[in-house]
Image (cartoon, helix red, strand yellow):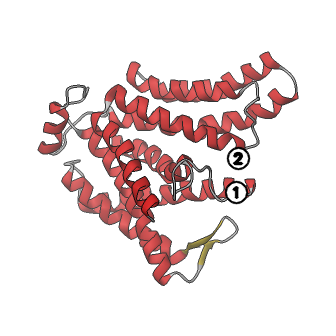
Amino acid sequence: MRDRVLSSIGVVLVGLVPSVLGGAVFAIGFVAIALVALTELLPLLGVTRSSPVIWSGYALIGVCGAIPLFWRGNQRLELAVALIATVPLLAALAAGGRAAIMGWTPTVAAAMYLGIPTFAAVDLRELTGESAGWLASLSAWLPISRDESGRGLGWLLLAVLVTWLTDTGAYLVGRTFGRRKLLPRVSPNKTVEGAVGGLIASAITAVLCASAFGLGIGPAVAALAGVGLGVAGMLGDLTESMIKRHAGVKDSGTLIPGHGGVLDRIDALLFVLLATWLMAPMLS
């Protein structure tokens, strides 16, 4: 239990400090987390460290984190997707052989799975616009912040808190009242009651965050958005559970004592960040 608590504190600090600082610090921090997650994911997909295309996955995640910082124009996501689709193929063609062919498709899938949320996270943090006065003051005070409005930080914190409290609500309600299995073939411990509890927690969290961060959306819209983000987080969690079940492992890694691997910690957040990135401009 002690290791689990200390690990939880460490995970929060590693994620929170770069998030608040924003800019290149956040981009580098999130890319680093995604790269560690990639080292855990590729073996689960059957890609060995000796694969001649594996380098392309690491490079593409770095590129996905850099695009929102250095290119503010249109079609940035399209560029990221195009690179992910083509670079591993070119690497496989250049290397040739069975190992390259076998590693090509999983590398594309892994780079898409981690790279696009990385792009979304960095671009979301760079979002500008109105926010609560205290949040804008915090952003303006930071010496390396590129955004003095605080809106990007507000949306990012909303995504993180919704992810965390949805998972917490689902766990507590499921453990107390859970009877009916949600998807036993994918994740046997998740229940329908837990999912409902998690979605209620996500709706409440989104309403409170929208108000506290001054995001300019009403309670009803915020609640609906929270439910949508909660569903996205559950899909992210179930997706990783499916991958691990196929690979025959309990955890993606052992880096975080009491928690498993990095991918185990960000599986839901990956989907929530992408959903928040899609949602924020529509609600602005």
Q: Which mark is residue 275?
A: none
Q: Nearer the viewer, residue 258 or 250?
A: 258
- Give the image location of residue 65, x and y in percent: 46, 28
**Dot 2: element:** helix
Quarter of the image with the C terminus is top left
* Rendered residue at 37%/57% (across/down): 162
Left or right, residue 248 beside residue 58: right
Mark 2–mark 1 CB contact (< 8 Å):
yes
Left or right, residue 1 beside residue 219: right
Q: Quadrant of residue 29?
A: top left
Left or right, residue 209 beside residue 12: left
Q: Is residue 78 above or below residue 229?
A: above
Q: Quadrant of residue 189?
A: bottom right
Q: Is residue 167 above or below residue 276?
A: below
Q: Nearer the viewer, residue 102 or 123?
A: 102
- What kind of residue is marked 2? Leu
- What kind of residue is marked 1? Val
Left or right, residue 169 beside residue 266: left
* Rendered residue at 45%/50% (across/down): 272
Q: Which mark is residue 44?
A: 2
Quarter of the image with the N terminus is bottom left
Confirm whether residue 78 shows in the render. no
Q: Which mark is residue 249?
A: 1
Dot 1, how many residues are within 10 Å of its Cα: few (below 14), some (14-19), or many (20+)?
few
Q: Earlier in the sequence, mark 2 or mark 1?
A: 2
Q: Quadrant of residue 79?
A: top right
Q: In 3D space, how far apart are the residues under numbered discs 2 and 1 (Cα atoms)?
A: 8 Å
